[in-house]
Amino acid sequence: MAEAEQVEEEGDYRTAVHLYDQLGKDIQAQHGRFDARALDAFEGVARSIGKSSQ
């Protein structure tokens, strides 16, 4: 999560989206579909997409 946040802060939203998405999928695979950490990661995807369109 820290790596994705750092990349997002640097303005590389495409990479941030990829990192958040992969993290969310990995967490779901290990801890279940509705794990709060996975949902947080997918919120990061949405946030990065939103920032990239500004």
Image (cartoon, rainbow, N blue to C red):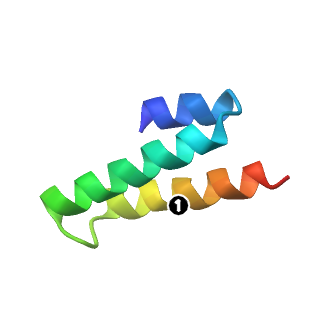
Q: Residue 38: x, y in percent?
A: 34, 59
State the residue in front, 31 or 49: 49
State the residue in front, 9 or 15: 15
Q: Secondary structure at mark 1?
A: helix
Residue found at the far left of this picture: 30
Quarter holding residue 35: bottom left
Q: Looking at the image, is 15 positioned above or below residue 26?
A: above
Count numbered badges in the picture: 1
Residue found at the far bottom of this picture: 34
Q: Residue 10: x, y in percent?
A: 68, 27
Q: Residue 52: x, y in percent?
A: 75, 49
Q: Residue at x 54, y 56 (%)?
A: 45
Left or right position of 2 against 23: right
Q: Residue 34: x, y in percent?
A: 28, 72
Residue with the mark numbered 1: 43
Left or right position of 48 against 54: left
Left or right position of 2 against 33: right
Q: Residue at x 80, y 55 (%)?
A: 53
Residue found at the far right of this picture: 54
Q: Residue at x 52, y 61 (%)?
A: 43
Q: Kindly identify the amino acid type of the residue bearing the numbered disc 1.
A: Glu
Q: Residue at x 30, y 58 (%)?
A: 25
Q: Looking at the image, is 16 positioned above or below residue 33?
A: above
Left or right position of 40 against 50: left
Q: Looking at the image, is 2 positioned above or below residue 50?
A: above
Mark 1 surroundings within 10 Å by alpha-carbon count, few (fewer than 14), some (14 through 19), many (20 or more): some
Quarter holding residue 9: top right
Q: Looking at the image, is 34 positioned above or below residue 36?
A: below
Q: Quadrant of the N terminus?
A: top left
